[in-house]
């Protein structure tokens, strides 16, 4: 195998790895957004419960 062929194969593997990392990054960003949304929903529900408790204590 000549050096140019080795270089081409390394470049191909590198490009595949870059694509793989970009795909995983996108998946993780989507997962993060879903977690943020869920956290916000939970916080909103907790706030509503606290308001109900305060109103009942009056």
Image: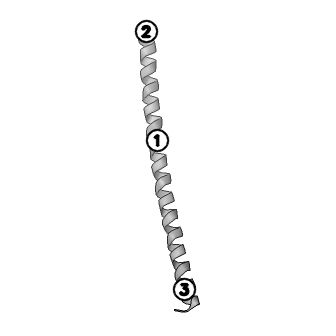
Residue 2 in the image: above or below residue 26: below
Of labels 3 and 1, earlier in sequence is: 3
* Vertical position of residue 53 compared to residue 8: above or below: above
Question: What label sits on residue 6 in the rendered view?
Answer: 3
* Residue 29 locus on image (x, y percent): 50, 53
Helix, strand or loop for disc 2 = helix
Q: Secondary structure at mark 3?
A: helix
Give the Cα distance between marks 2 and 1. Answer: 31 Å
Residue that sits furthest to the top in the current view: 58
Mark 3 against mark 1, which lies toward the viewer? 3
Q: Is residue 49 left or right of residue 5?
A: left
* Above or below 53: residue 30: below
Q: How far is the residue under mark 3 from the one under mark 2?
A: 75 Å
Residue located at (44% from left, 13% from top): 55
> Quick one: label 3, few (<14), some, or many (20+) residues within 10 Å?
few
- Residue bearing the label numbered 1: 37
Q: Are marks 3 and 1 in contact (CB under 8 Å)?
A: no
**Relative to 56, 5 lies left or right:** right
- Label 1 neighbourhood size at 10 Å, few (<14), some (14-19), many (20+)? few
Q: Residue at x 45, y 43 (%)?
A: 35
Residue corresponding to mark 2: 57
Q: Closer to the N terminus: mark 2 or mark 1? A: 1
Which of the two labelled residues, at mark 3 and mark 2, occupies the earlier sequence position?
3
- The residue at the point 43 percent across, 33 percent down is 42
Q: Residue at x 47, y 52 (%)?
A: 30
**Rendering coords of residue 18 (x, y %):** 53, 68
């Amino acid at each position: 195998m000549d050096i140019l062929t080795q270089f081409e194969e390394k470049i191909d593997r590198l490009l595949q790895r870059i694509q793989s990392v970009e795909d995983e990054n996108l998946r993780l960003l989507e997962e993060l957004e879903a977690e943020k949304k869920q956290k916000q929903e939970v916080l909103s529900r907790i706030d509503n419960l606290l308001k109900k408790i305060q109103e009942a204590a009056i």
